[in-house]
Amino acid sequence: MTDPSNATAPSPAAAPAVTTLSAARVRAHLLAHDTEIALLDVREEDPYAQAHPLWAANLPLSRIELEAWRRIPRRDTRIVLFGVHAGEDLAPRAAAVLQRLGYTQVHALEGGLDGWRAAGGELFRDVNVPSKAFGELVEHERHTPSLAAEEVKALIDAKADVVVLDARRFDEYQTMSIPTATSVPGAELVLRARALAPDPRTRIVVNCAGRTRSIIGTQSLVNAGLPNPIAALRNGTIGWTLAGQALDHGADRRAPADIDPAVRAQAQADARRVAERAGVRWIAADALDSLRVPGRTVYRFDVRTPEEYAAGHRPGFASAPGGQLVQETDHHVPVRGARIVLSDEGEGVRAPMTASWLAQMGWDVHVLQGPAELGEAGVPVAELPPHRHDVDGIAPAALAALAALLQAGDAVLVDVGASANYVKRHIPGAWFAVRAQLPQVLAQLPRTGTLVLTCGSSLLARYAADDVREWLDAQGDARALRVLDGGNAAWFAAGLPEESGEARLATPRTDRYRRPYEGTDAPREAMQAYLDWEFGLVAQLGRDGTHHFRVI
């Protein structure tokens, strides 16, 4: 298919006018301690990762309805949008969506990314940049100890008294890990390291895929005062691979679930001491409402493991395992200047340690204290906005009956879900398209027969159908529009045919930025370039000047 960015797109309904804020005004809000701002890049993740301001969070136009109410809970939050992709300024369309969702202070960044650059603003690459830059600053200021991959391998080969603790999510650890490593996600380290290395002479090595979680995990143990010799695996699994050393795949070693009461008590005391040094405050459950004041957003997170959260959690608290919350703070808390309340439901280790890092990153953070209140089980269903149009569904069996028409182009099926899932498997004959580019795609796809939209679950396809209905009406296009009931999940569950690969990409796969440190097939050049980029982040922080980081 030709590049849809060159097509003549149907015109969506005119959006309300959006006021602009200059780069200088946005910077002033970021520098202020008493105001909130959500600076949002509404492009897909890949273009976002190529260049954006330090505190810009990614909220793609394609997914606003699915994410906005959860990620930006206060409807009068000051929001500033930017993002030009394929020659189109997406900010006006994104502003219209946010205004429909009830947000009352929606602005565009004057001049967009070019305006930020022209005003002397620093631009950063990659994702989760505030957390990664902070990690580099921690190592720079605290001289966090580390060992090269060759040194760690020599210790393992010699069967030395050493334990390797992998601070990533368990699924990342299973994909690839250091031989002998045990999975201990970041917030669990201070709670569980003593049980895994009870002898103070045992060396502890903390690793992740790259650098950030290795540094933060190692420094967590150092800050907590563990007596063991502790070091990060320098450059993580990337460094291990670049040294020509083999990784394990499919490992399943985890720390024991039970913890000796004396060990737990020591970890609790250590965590509280570290959190108090960082300026963390404690708050009782009956005082939570005191944080809800005009102009302030309050995020509430349960930092235990997802399994513990699902088994029972405090109502109103979202699941955000502590290590990932520190690693992906911009995703979980896109409103800079917001307040954060953390709970580990009486545990007293994971919440204070997580809070200690968030406080050093400049967040106003509290730890909930008091007895556990596990009044809710499972994962709450997010509240989503209503649909603008009543678009009929089509059952998987009925869609299967259109198979010949799909192959001939007399009916059209467009998958607006994640491109990675599409490549892995999709419905035969389906086109992949980034939802935000559907106007351009529809201008080029066949205009006969039924048009069907799908995604993984049908949630995103339903919102895409709202857009498509309006675009078709604007053109006087009366063809039937349907949404696959239950999405691809229902199709596959019915045992219907599937295919894989990139045969029908109506748009490039810009919805996902491929991290150089994920998976097992990243080019060596990309891995080295990623490390070089991380090494330069401290200098970038100095030039940017908006971070408010303070390392204890």
Image (spheres, rainbow, N blue to C red):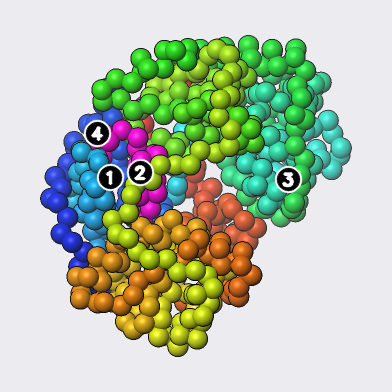
Foreground disc of the pair 1, 3: 1
Name the residue tied to disc 3.
Answer: 178
Name the residue tied to disc 2.
Answer: 68
**Label 3 sits on what residue type?**
Ile
Above or below for 258 versus 174: above
**Nearer the observer, 190 or 372:** 372
14 horizontally vs 500: left or right:
left
**Label 1 sits on what residue type?**
Leu
Query: Which residues fall within the magenta stretch?
Result: 52-80
Kind of element beneath mark 3: loop
Mark drawn on residue 101: 1
**Nearer the observer, 387 or 302:** 387
Kind of element beneath mark 2: helix
Mark 3 or mark 2, earlier in chain: 2
Foreground disc of the pair 1, 4: 1
Q: Report the residue at 70% width, 44% height from top.
A: 149
262 horizontally vs 303: left or right:
right
**Nearer the observer, 237 or 36:** 36
Kind of element beneath mark 4: loop
C-alpha gap between disc 3 and disc 4: 47 Å
Name the residue tied to disc 4.
Answer: 76
Foreground disc of the pair 3, 2: 2
Is residue 98 within the magenta segment? no
Foreground disc of the pair 3, 4: 4
C-alpha gap between disc 1 and disc 3: 46 Å
Q: Residues within 10 Å of mark 1 (few under 14, many from 20)?
A: some
**Label 2 sits on what residue type?**
Ala
Q: Residues within 10 Å of mark 2 (few under 14, many from 20)?
A: many
Q: Report the residue at 59% width, 53% height from top.
A: 518
Q: Quadrant of the N terminus?
A: bottom left
